[in-house]
Image (tube, coloured by chain):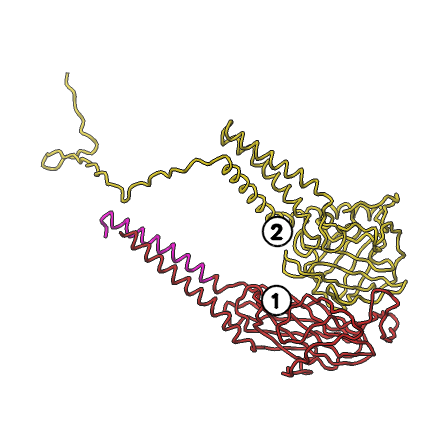
Chain colours: A red, B yellow
Amino acid sequence: MHWDRGRVAASLMLLTALGVAGGVACASPASAEGCSSTVLTITVGSPDANTPTNEPGSGCVSIPGGVSEPATGSNPAPGTPLSSGPGLPRNATPSASASPAPTATPKPGETDLGGILYLSGLRSNYVWSVNPAESVVELRITLRNVSQSTFDSTARFWIDTSLGNTVSEIANFRIDGLRPNETRVVTARLGGLGQWTVLQAHATIKPPTTVDGVALAPITRDSYVFIPPLLAGGIGVFGVGAFFLGKSLVALRLAARARGVL
Amino acid sequence: MTTELMPPAAARVTPAGIRTTKVRIPKPIRAPRRPPRAPILRAALTTGQIVARSVLIVFAALLLAFVLNVTVLSQIQHLVVQQQLSDAYREQLAAGTAPVSEGDFNNVLLPDGAPLGVISIPSLGIKEIFVEGTSADSLKSGPGHRRDTVLPGQAGISVIMGRAAAYGAPFARIQELAPGDQFSVRTGQGKQVFTVIGVRYAGDPTLVSPTPTQSRLTLVTARGPAFIPSGLAYVDAQLVQQAKPAGARQTTYIGLPPQDLAMASDTSTIWALVFALQFLVIAEIASVWAFRRIGAQKTWVVFVPVTLLAVLFTANQVTILLPNLL
C-alpha cells in the first residue's frame, strides 16, 4: 500500500518533469518561429558600409546559354530566390578553350585566377546559451572579387530545422562596392533559434547577372549547426534524479515505519 | 570435588545480591510483504526459433560493432596508421627517396597507401600524411592522392581526397577555408605553398584550366551532416611559387579504378567480407558447442575474444563498402 503511494508520488514527479520538458520542447519551435525576424546583427568588412534592407527577392534566375541547372544541394525555403549555381562564369568549362571573358591582367607576383567571384564555405558558430530564447548562431562567408570591375551583390542568410521550416532569416542584405581583388568577410548573427539540436544554415550570394561581360548566377553555401538541447536535457536529468530521489525517500520512510520509528 | 560455576558474561549482580541475566528474545519471523514471484515457465523453443534468435543476436552484435567501428575505432586506427606513415615518410625524406612520381626511386609503381607527402593547414589544425590512392581502403589511412593527377606543386592539377567523418575526418572542416588562406604541402620536391581560390560544390562550373606553368591543388571531401554525406565539396588552391616539373604518371583518368572516384565504394575486397562472415559463423557455432559441452566459464574466456575479433573484422570489411569520403 505504501509502495503504491510511493509509486504514485514518483510517477507524478516524473510526469511533471516530462510535462515541463515537453512544454519547453513545444515552446521552442513556437518561440523560434515567432522570432524568425529576430536578427541581431550582420556585419561586413566595413561595418558602416551597409545596412540591412527588406527589398523583395527577384525570383528565379535565368541561365543564359541553356546551361543546365547545377545541383547545389541547397534546399531553399519556398518562395525564396532559386539558387542556380555559383558566381563563376557560366561559360567556363573544364577545357581551356572555354575560358571566360575576364581580362584582368595580373600584376607581377599575382596569378590570374580566371574568374569573377570566389567564395569560401559557410562557417557557423553557435553562441552558447542555456536559455533557448537567446540562442544565436554566427554565420560567416568570405567573398573575393577577382574581376576588373567593382560590383554590388546581395546576400540571404537563413536557418532551417531538420524538419525543413525556416526559423531565422536575413534576406536581401546588400554587399555594396566589392572592389577588384578585394576580399570581404560577411558575418550574420541569427537569433531566435530555440534549441532544435540540428539546424541547417544557408547563405546565398547573388551577384549581378553580368560582370565584365560574363554571366553570373547566385551561389549557395550550406553548413550544419549543432545546438545542444541544454534546457530540455537539464530538465530531463532533473526529472530522472527527482524520481529516484523520491523513490529512495519513500523506501526509507516505509522502512522506518516498519521499524516503528515513525 | 567442588566445581565453581562461573556466571555468564551477560550476568550482573545487583547491589542487593540478586543475580540478573539478560536474555535475548529472538524476533518473531515476519511474513514477507509480498509473496515471492512464481517462476516464469517459458515455453520450449523450437529449432527454428533457436536459430532465429541466434541470427538476430549475431546481427545485433554486427550492427553494434559496425557503429562502434565507424565512430570510435576508426579514429584510433587512423591515429595509429598516421604515426606509422609519418615514421616511414620521414625515413624516405631523410634518405632522399620520397616519391616525386607514380613510381618509387626504383621505378616500381607505388602501391595504394604508400605515403606521398604531408599536407599542413595550420588554421584548421590539419597536419596529415597523404597517401597514394583514393579508394575507401586507402582513405582509412589519411587523405589520398588521386593517381591520375600530378603531385601537389607540380605543373597541372593535383587532387587530394579526404574523409569528412570517419577515420579521423581529416577534411571535415576544409570548407572553412576562405579565399586567400594559405596552406602548405611537403613532398619529395620540397615545401609547396598554396593560396585558396574558393570553395565549390559538386555541380558548380569548374575553374578554367591552369596554364602549363601553373600548379593547382583541389581538395575534395563530402559535405552534409557527419556520416550522412549529401554531396561533394571542393577547395581549389593555387601554388604561389614556381611549379615543379611533373613526374611520370602511368594511370590516366580512363584507367583509374572505379573505386578511386569520389564517393565510390570499394567492392574489390568483398571476398574478404565473405571470409569474415564465415569466420564469424564458425566462431558462433564453436562457442555454442563449447557452451554446452565444456561450460560457461571456459567458453567465455576462450570465445569472447575470438567472437569479438570476428565481429570487428566483419564490421571493418563492411565499412569499406561505404562511400570513400564518408
- Residue B64 lies, in percent from the top left, at 57, 46
- Residue A36 lies, in percent from the top left, at 56, 75
Q: Chain of mark 2?
A: B
Q: Chain of mark 1?
A: A
Q: In the shown orientation, is residue A139 left or right of residue A16?
A: right
Secondary structure at badge 2 equals helix
Tell me if residue A54 comes above or below residue A7 in the rendering.
below
On residue A200, the disc is: 1
Q: CA distance from mark 1 to mark 2?
A: 22 Å
Residue occupying the point 56% across, 77% down = A38
On residue B71, the disc is: 2
Whether residue A106 is visible, yes or no, is yes
Disc 2: CA contacts within 10 A as few (<14), some (14-19) or many (>=20)? some
Q: Main secondary structure of the magenta part?
A: helix
Residue occupying the point 55% across, 45% down = B60
Magenta region: A234-262
Residue in the foreground of this view, choosing between A10 and A218: A218
- Residue A133 lies, in percent from the top left, at 51, 72
Is residue A254 part of the magenta span, yes or no?
yes
Tag 1: residue type? Gln
